[in-house]
Amino acid sequence: MIVLFTDFGSRDPYVGQVKARLYREAPGAAIVDLLHEAPDFNPHAGAHLLAALAPQFPVGSVFLAVVDPGVGTPRGTVVLEADGNWFVGPDNGLLSVLASRARATRLWRIVWRPAALSATFHGRDLFAPVAGEIARGDFPHDKLASVDELGVMFDAGDLPRVIYIDHYGNAWTGIRGASPAAQVRAGGQAFPHAESFGFAGKGTGCWFVNSVGLVEIALNRGSAAATYGLRVGDPVAVQRAS
């Protein structure tokens, strides 16, 4: 299984081009579109999203993870094995949170460069061929060099910011859980806890722990992002009950 996690968006041709290359390299592999609306140019938010989402997938999954504003520059390119799953992408912090939280890891630098390599599309020309080889069971030893650590590491603790806004306008944070007695503050507002949307009145804001274990701010039958002016990167505070 190859899992795609990118900021490429769903209306442009980039995802289709990556898939075409993957099908050439690993024609029998299933390809799962996990997310193509990761926050643009934001590997920090993407790192916390990926760390929360990846554990749902079976051991042996190959993640092609691309949020890469430095594409074409000398930034590193890596393959990470973390708790039995594989991650291929840029060494810009995107893979660092899940690497730090994993029980066991191995790491390689991608030293191979294809003859045809677009300066702006390493997702298709560099990462997809490597991910495809791993997915079909042909580990590309000749393309990799073992290294001890990533070049860019983000703090693997909770990130008290909005890291993603879904199409409903729900604001995901980088905070892993909180006491139901706590208040969550963001955008100048205080939000009480609810177990789910339906426990808040219509048009009422609340927070809950979402399906991947992160604190999420929502508005019952409305957009919390639009109503409260929430954006990716906004600070979030958890105020413990006194």
Image: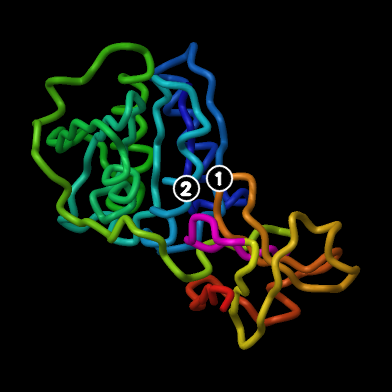
**Of all residues shown, which one is farthest toward the right?**
202
User: Quick one: 169 or 98, which is closer to the camera?
Assistant: 98
Q: In which quadrant of the rendered view does residue 37 lie?
A: bottom right
Label 2 Cα neighbours within 10 Å, binned few <14 / some 14-19 / many ≥20: many
For the residue labelled by badge 1, is the local secondary structure a helix, a strand or a loop? strand
Rendered image: mark on residue 35: 1
Contact check, label 1 and label 2, Cβ < 8 Å: yes
Q: Which residue is mark 2?
A: 6
Q: What's under tag 2, amino acid-wise?
A: Thr
Height in image: 182 above or below 147? below
**Of all residues shown, which one is farthest toward the front?**
242
**Is 72 left, or right, of 30 in this rendering?**
left
Q: Position of residue 52 (x, y in %)?
A: 48, 46
**Is 79 left, or right, of 214 in this rendering?**
left
Instruction: Identify the residue at horizontal 50%, vertical 28% (top origin).
Output: 57
User: Quick one: 164 or 18, which is closer to the camera?
Assistant: 164
Q: Position of residue 88 (x, y in %)?
A: 31, 36
